[in-house]
Amino acid sequence: MLQDSGKVCYYLNGEAATDMIHYGREKAFAMTPYNAACYVSTGDMNAKMYAMMMKAFDKNSYFRFKKDYPDLAELMDCLKKPASVEDYKKIRQCVKDYNQKTN
């Protein structure tokens, strides 16, 4: 579910986002070994999405995103490498701040 857009897009896991809205919760996670808590992509809606927080696999997605988009160094400095599922708030804020600066 798209949560923020601009030069960079931030997506929350759709199941988790729906749970948050339905139950009025501040946080909720629906992570399986095949889902991430959140994703980022460039502002092109057809761009590849990169999982930022994984439960069981593909933990190097952050590094691939950083390598594929070196022009987003300022954003990547803010993100660093997400370490836990709680970092979805940090990731979202970094994307939001970056998009505000680049508009």
Image (spheres, grey):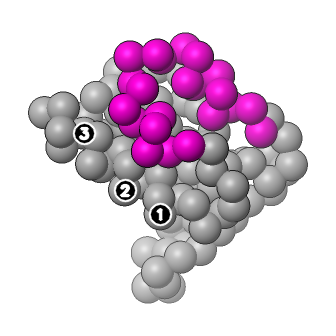
Secondary structure predominantly adopted by residues drawn in magenta: helix
Q: Which three-letter amino acid code belongs to the residue tagged 2?
A: Gln
Q: Which mark is residue 93?
A: 2
Where is the C terminus found, in terms of image quarters? top left
Disc 3 marks which amino acid?
Asn
The residue under label 3 is 99
Q: Residue at the location (37% across, 32% down)?
A: 74
The mark that comes first in sequence, 3 or 2, is: 2
Q: Distance between the residues labelled 1 and 2?
A: 6 Å
Taking the spot 46% from the left edge, 80% from the top edge, the residue there is 26
Kind of residue at badge 1: Lys
| Secondary structure type for disc 2 | helix
Instruction: Give the class, few, some or many, for how many residues have Cα within 10 Å of label 2's Cα (few <14, many ≥20).
Output: some
Q: Residues within 10 Å of mark 1 (few under 14, many from 20)?
A: few
Up-down relation of residue 21 to residue 95 (above or below): below
Q: Where is residue 9 in the image (x, y as percent from the top left)?
A: 38, 37
Residue placed farthest to the bottom in the image?
Answer: 24
What residue did someone put label 1 on? 89
Q: Does dot 1 land on a helix, a strand or a loop?
A: helix
* Quadrant of res 21: bottom left
Q: Are marks 1 and 2 in contact (CB under 8 Å)?
A: yes
| Magenta-highlighted residues | 59-80
On whether residue 65 falls in the magenta region, the answer is yes
